[in-house]
Amino acid sequence: MGVKVLIVEDNPVARGFLSRVVRDSFSDISAITEAGDLDAARRLLGHRSGQRAQASGADDDGYKLILVDLELPDGSGLELLSELAHYPATRIVTTLYSDDEHLFPALQRGADGYLLKEDRFEVLVEELQKIVRGQPPLSPAIARRLLGHFRNGASDGSGPVSGFGPSDFGTSRPAPLDARREAGTDCERLTPRENEVLTYLSKGFTIKEIANLMGIKWFTVNDHIKSIYKKLNVSSRAEAAVLASKQGLV
């Protein structure tokens, strides 16, 4: 079964552009659905889609990739991001805004990536393809902004200029790996499938390679990785690999 994609964008030209970007980025797209506003997106997702996804833990027939514009005729894309907190999909903001006032609230609401529609077609394709390599899709300008944002905050001890900090993302700074280990975080909490994914991750395989090895979709691997990171309280492949090594998985 192919992957279903939802594009939430009010500009028809931009919708067509993003649709072409998606099709050029992935080979297993079965359908791309477009919504011009929040109301249409909610109808397509279902009135209680988030709650159903949370209860079931999966939705094989649901959307696995959702692109969300921030400025919509009937509200902000931030509202939709909040409503999709438990929906099992990769949620990526596609916008013209590169300022802190839009970037950080989007990440705080659960966006898995942040792309600028003004970027070249090839750049957007490359950034979307990062998903299957286990990397967050961020436009180059956004990645530089994030690095500069936290570097500036750390350099003068006064914190980021805009007032945002790690606590604004709904989580405190990750504890040292040994502290997490002592707190009882261990690989036994993972399901057998998650342990298998973690083992492959630790050996350097990409998400697409793991999907091929396990005979599953790369979006399913991506879901497993999100669960692994959450359960182990880590934020990167390197941290997860250290814990896997401590557990003798690799």
Image (cartoon, rainbow, N blue to C red):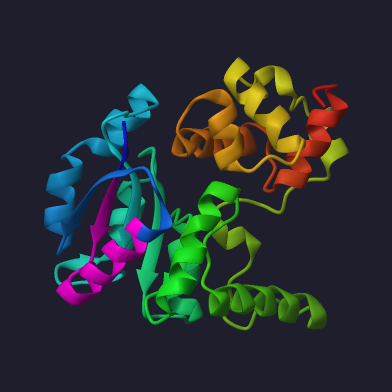
Helix, strand or loop for the magenta stretch, by majority: helix
Q: Position of residue 140 (x, y in %)?
A: 57, 76
Q: Is residue 152 visible?
A: yes
Q: Is residue 6 above or below residue 227?
A: below
Q: Is residue 238 above or below residue 100?
A: above
Q: Position of residue 135 (x, y in %)?
A: 60, 54
Q: Which residues are magenta?
A: 4-23
Residue for point 53% across, 34% down: 221
Q: Is residue 247 above or below residue 234?
A: above
Residue for point 34% across, 24% down: 55
Query: Would residue 114 be found to the left or right of residue 19 on screen?
Result: right
Residue for point 58% across, 41% down: 207
> Which quadrant would the C terminus be assigned to in this image?
top right
Q: Is residue 83 above or below residue 68?
A: above
Q: Is residue 80 magenta?
A: no
Q: Is residue 11 visible?
A: no
Query: Would residue 30 be found to the left or right of residue 226 on screen?
Result: left
